[in-house]
Amino acid sequence: MAIERTLCIIKPDAVEKRKAGAILALLEENGFQVLALQRSHLTKHVAEGFYAVHKARPFFGELVTFMTRSPVVIAVLEREDAVAKYRGVMGATDPAKADAGTIRKLHGANVGENAVHGSDSLENAKNEIAYFFPASVVAPSA
Ligand code: ADP
Ligand code: MG
């Protein structure tokens, strides 16, 4: 298994509930190294660009409104098999369907306000990391 990087966004609902620290601690306990960390309040333009792949989905407007309502915490995570391992620790999109002990089961409210984002492929992880972090902060991985 290769060492990979993936992108985590702790979403507004979880930051508002002061769960960012607990979520980062859980990720560290699961073997992830936090390579870079940033707190920011996403603009509409930045959120729309990040979720451009979902533009045609009926929940797109709701998603952008949610993601811009208050600050997020964005982290670059690294470990062996990071993309798949983080999807596992994150849990299903709908917290009601997420496994016990996952971040979304522990901290998510509903299918929209589900505490965290996670990249869904290695290629998307690279693009998403580059969307938020310049190479001067996180050198591109091989
Ligand atoms: P995931 O975040 O698990 O990769 P998706 O990529 O399918 O899920 O969706 C992106 C985000 O859009 C979700 O995390 C959630 O915040 C929101 N979302 C997905 N499905 C719905 C829905 N049916 N209603 C409202 N928001 C949704
Ligand atoms: Mg997704």
Image: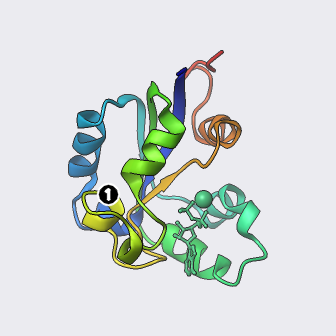
Residue 94: x and y in percent read: 45, 73
Task: Report the label total.
Answer: 1
Closer-to-camera residue (50/119):
119
Which residue position is annotated with label 1? 103
What residue do we see at 41% from left, 69% from top?
A: 114
Amino acid at circle 1: Ile
Closer-to-camera residue (11/69):
11
**Residue 84 appears in the rendering:** yes
What residue do we see at 47% from left, 77% from top?
A: 111
Residue 109: x and y in percent read: 34, 77
Which residue is outermost to the bottom? 58
Closer-to-camera residue (39/90):
90
On-image quarter of the C terminus: top right
Tell me: residue 131, above or below residue 51.
above
What residue do we see at 50% from left, 74% from top?
A: 66
Residue 113, quarter of picture:
bottom left
**Residue 68 appears in the rendering:** no
Closer-to-camera residue (31/34):
31
Ligand 1 is located in which of the four quadrants?
bottom right
Q: Is residue 126 left or right of residue 89?
A: right
What residue do we see at 38% from left, 67% from top?
A: 98
Residue 53, quarter of picture:
bottom right
Q: Is residue 80 left or right of residue 125?
A: left
